[in-house]
Image (tube, rainbow, N blue to C red):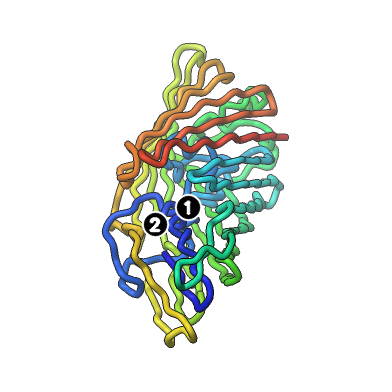
Amino acid sequence: MTIVKTGKCLCGFGLLLLFAPLPSQPVMAGEVGTTGANFLKIPIAPIPAAMGHAYTAMVGIDSILYNPAGLGLMSYSAISAVQHKYIEGVTQSYAAIAYRSRFGTVAAAFSVLNSGSIDAYDINDHRIGETQTSHRFGVLAFSQSYPHFNEDRGKHDTMLIHPGWTIIEPVRDYRPKTMRFSVGVSLKYVAETLDNVKSMTFSGDIGILLVLSHHIQIGASMLNITGKQKFYDDSFSLPRTVRIGIAKDFHTVKQIMIFKLTTDLISECDSEFDRGNEWSGGYLKSDLISEWDSKFHGAAGIEIDILKFAQLRGGYRMDRDLGTGLSVGLGLTLKRIRLDYAYLNYGIFGGTHRIGFQLIW
């Protein structure tokens, strides 16, 4: 998107195009299919990113980004921090914390994405200096599982897919092999700054996760349910996303290797666009490519956990035409600490790198 104002042109906003995972067909501003805050679609955490963004049915601190219900099945508390090197000098920082109590899991996350320096021009295409953009979101979530066993805190319920932490021992007491389920909700704050123009809104996520026998987990969530991003007199709905996922793991003899398979079906709904009055002294011009809000697309991922020490990950997303859609990653687990890395390729724009750190207690 290029914003033209009297005296200043932020032509470097072509970078904002890249904040959406899949460009497709060009549309003019005001057509159905455009969305606001598309940076929310960027995979941040290295574990889900390496597994093709397919994480709706998984359990862990990264569930706050995909399905808040996954937090309710955590038996431990955790901290996560991520540094993300995106394309064309764009960087992103992310941090999250989840605390498991007898009443449920409370979690919070915050992320900041910065564009770096962008050349600024006046309406006559004369360079007048540099500008920047900033994109932020914060999340506060709560989730609880049923049935809930307070005495299992710090232990692993053997009905769930194993989290891979060596410090977490399985529950030795009897637990009925009945269905487990969890529900979760979150409140989300979204803010963007484009040069000297600011926009802020609130939204929310909801989700549910079912745990069946034989280590089968099924999750569903709706993200960015409400909220509109407004710049000047124009407003765009946030990218509302519906996710349905299933996950299962397979163990070799003596759990030398654990294979975790996950797949998601994702719907990114077309947004609603409200065109206000003509800008005073300027206009809005869109000469780039908008996000393709397809009805449905899929994603799949695999993690191979070796001796609960090293993890190899891979994934594929069917909604990308930048790059191959393939992603890879690896991790190392040392009792209470985990280090993770993910690599995603964006074709002519090059590769992106995510480095993450987790600590549990």
Sequence-wise, which precedes: disc 2 or disc 1?
Answer: 1
Q: Nearer the viewer, residue 100 or 66?
A: 66
Q: Residue at x 41, y 29 (%)?
A: 314
> Toward which corner of the image does residue 142 lie, by quadrant?
bottom right
Q: Residue at x 61, y 52 (%)?
A: 111
* Secondary-structure class at tag 1: strand
For the question of whether residue 214 can be seen, the reply is no
User: Is 288 above or below relative to 160?
Assistant: below
Return the x and y of residue 101 as percentages of the image width and height.
71, 47
The disc labelled 2 sits on which kind of residue? Val
* Secondary-structure class at tag 2: strand
The mark tally for this picture is 2
Quadrant showing the N terminus: bottom left
Q: Residue at x 42, y 23 (%)?
A: 250
> Mark 2 or mark 1, which is nearer to you?
2
For the question of whether residue 346 can be seen, the reply is yes
Q: Read off the residue under disc 2.
A: 242
Query: How packed is label 2: few (under 14 Cα within 10 Å), some, or many (20 or more)?
Result: many
Query: How packed is label 1: few (under 14 Cα within 10 Å), some, or many (20 or more)?
Result: many
Q: Read off the residue under disc 1.
A: 208
Return the x and y of residue 361 as percentages of the image width and height.
73, 35
